[in-house]
Image (cartoon, rainbow, N blue to C red):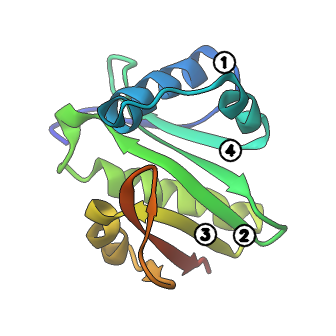
Amino acid sequence: MKSTTLTFCQIEYASPEYDDSLRLRYRILRAPLGLDYTEEQIIEEWDSYHFGIYDQNQFLKACLTFKAIDEHTLKMRQVVVDQDVQGQGLGKILVSHAEHWVLIQGFKNIELHARDTAVPFYLSMNYLAAGAPFVEVGIAHQKMEKHIS
């Protein structure tokens, strides 16, 4: 990004910052597919780990969510970068900071379902494709994994 001050932070569920993340995720990931969040989907995120990057004006520019699969593995979900800063490296900053948190917390593995358009991004971050591509929410996806050490 240009000479901007960025702040990486953990986002508390049901906080104003969490609401920011829902709005960003909806606008970039769900609205283009004609999808909305159900109350049940939002409630299911209570035990997830949420992270974001805010700019100097306190606007959320990127966020992601982790859900524990087991004591060693997290599933990364809903990774999004606002359209006005896409292609400027913010996604890599977000994922790198989140991976550092994962390591500190003692988790060993991250898995995710990448949209086909995001696979090159995750490959560049040393994630590996696992299994055959599949369709999820009407879009081609690839399961990807990374061991964190």
Q: Which residue is mark 2?
A: 73
- Of the residues shown, which amino acid type is indicated by label 1? Ser
- Of the residues shown, which amino acid type is indicated by label 2? Thr
The residue under the point 54% across, 78% down is: 146
Cβ–Cβ under 8 Å for marks 4 and 2: no
Reply above or below: 33 against 147. above
- Of the residues shown, which amino acid type is indicated by label 4? Tyr
Q: CA distance from mark 2 to mark 1?
A: 25 Å
Tag 1 or tag 2, which sits nearer the N-term? 1
Label 3 CA crowd tier, 10 Å (few <14, some 14–19, many 20+):
many
Horizontal side of residue 66 vs 106, given as left or right: left
Is residue 12 shown to the viewer in this render?
A: no
Q: Which residue is mark 1?
A: 15
Looking at the rendered structure, the number of numbered marks drawn on it comes to 4
Q: Quadrant of residue 133?
A: bottom left
Cβ–Cβ under 8 Å for marks 2 and 1: no
Which is nearer the eye, 114 or 122?
Answer: 114
Quadrant (top left, top right, bottom left, bottom right) of the N terminus: top left
Cβ–Cβ under 8 Å for marks 3 and 2: yes
Tag 2 or tag 3, which sits nearer the N-term? 2
Q: Which residue is mark 3?
A: 110
Tag 1 or tag 3, which sits nearer the N-term? 1
Which is nearer the eye, 149 or 113?
Answer: 113
Reply above or below: 120 against 77. below
- Of the residues shown, which amino acid type is indicated by label 3? Ile
Tag 2 or tag 4, which sits nearer the N-term? 4
Cβ–Cβ under 8 Å for marks 1 and 4: no
Q: CA distance from mark 3 to mark 1?
A: 25 Å
Q: Which residue is mark 4?
A: 49
Q: What is the secondary structure assignment of the residue under circle 1?
A: loop
